[in-house]
Image (cartoon, rainbow, N blue to C red):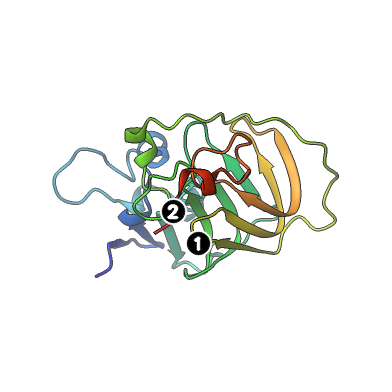
């Protein structure tokens, strides 16, 4: 059974998928007239904003829990010009790209678990909060050169009991927006215990990390 709430407005169909939500609260903080918190009954009101504002609101949702379909002939969500993997302080890695995650439907936004405690691996389910996960959102900046191609398909393979294997152009960005690295291939830690976060250093083998 789908957990997607779809509310049709005059110019846009606004969707909310609770299973993806990590409670970043961008929606209720920036547009509490569209996503009305702490009410009984209807809480999603797409007609309180323009289609362009709805699109911007959706794109501010790192997990992809908010989606939209334009009914006015305007453009729907497209792949970004630059593929980004944003490292969130004490939390997941928020990826924005033309994503191809093994075993998952295509998408443009996702928050990927790096604490090891999520029940919805490879996605974050906010378990890092209860687990007390601690990891900087400002990892050491590596020397890297501008990528000749900054977008395109980004493939992510969550390896069995191991890291997230990433293939494709992506810029790894800190929580404050600094470019940390530019790569076309890397392995990202998802056991939560690497000494070289956000990258894998093989610690998952020592700690017996289980991905399933």
Q: Residue at x 76, y 55 (%)?
A: 150
Q: Is residue 106 left or right of residue 34?
A: right
Pick the residue in front: 197 or 72: 197
Q: The N terminus appears in which quarter of the rendering?
A: bottom left
Q: Dot 1: within a 10 Å radius of its alpha carbon, few (fewer than 14), some, or many (20 or more) residues?
A: few
Across and down, in percent, residue 175 comes to 58, 33
Residue 9 vertical placement versus 171 (above, below):
below
Q: Is residue 124 left or right of residue 144?
A: left
Residue that label 2 marks: 123
Q: The C terminus appears in which quarter of the rendering?
A: bottom left
Residue 125 vertical placement versus 140 (above, below):
below
Across and down, in percent, residue 58 comes to 46, 51
Q: Is residue 142 left or right of residue 130?
A: right
Across and down, in percent, residue 41 comes to 15, 50
Sequence-wise, the earlier of marks 1 and 2 is 2
- Residue 78 seen anywhere in this rendered image of the structure: no
Q: Is residue 68 left or right of residue 95?
A: left
Residue 167 figure quarter: bottom right
- Residue 67 seen anywhere in this rendered image of the structure: yes
Q: Which mark is residue 160?
A: 1
């Amino acid at each position: 059974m789908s957990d997607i709430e779809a509310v049709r407005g005059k110019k846009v169909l606004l969707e909310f998928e609770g299973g993806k939500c990590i409670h970043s609260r961008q929606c209720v903080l920036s547009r509490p007239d569209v996503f009305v918190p702490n009410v009984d009954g209807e809480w999603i009101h797409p007609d309180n904003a323009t289609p362009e504002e709805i699109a911007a609101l959706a794109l501010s949702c790192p997990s992809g829990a908010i989606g939209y379909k334009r009914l006015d002939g305007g453009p729907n969500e497209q792949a970004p010009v630059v593929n980004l993997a944003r490292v969130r302080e004490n939390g997941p890695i928020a990826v924005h790209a033309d994503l191809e995650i093994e075993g998952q439907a295509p998408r443009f936004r996702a928050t990927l678990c790096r604490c090891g405690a999520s029940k919805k691996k490879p996605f974050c389910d906010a378990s890092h909060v209860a687990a007390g996960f601690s990891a900087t959102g400002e990892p050491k900046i590596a020397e890297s050169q501008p990528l000749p191609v900054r977008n395109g398909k980004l493939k992510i393979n969550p390896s069995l009991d191991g890291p997230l294997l990433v293939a494709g152009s992506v810029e790894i960005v800190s929580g404050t927006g600094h470019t940390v690295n530019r790569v076309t291939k890397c392995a990202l830690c998802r056991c939560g215990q690497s000494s070289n976060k956000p990258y894998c250093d093989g610690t998952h083998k020592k700690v017996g990390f289980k991905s399933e």
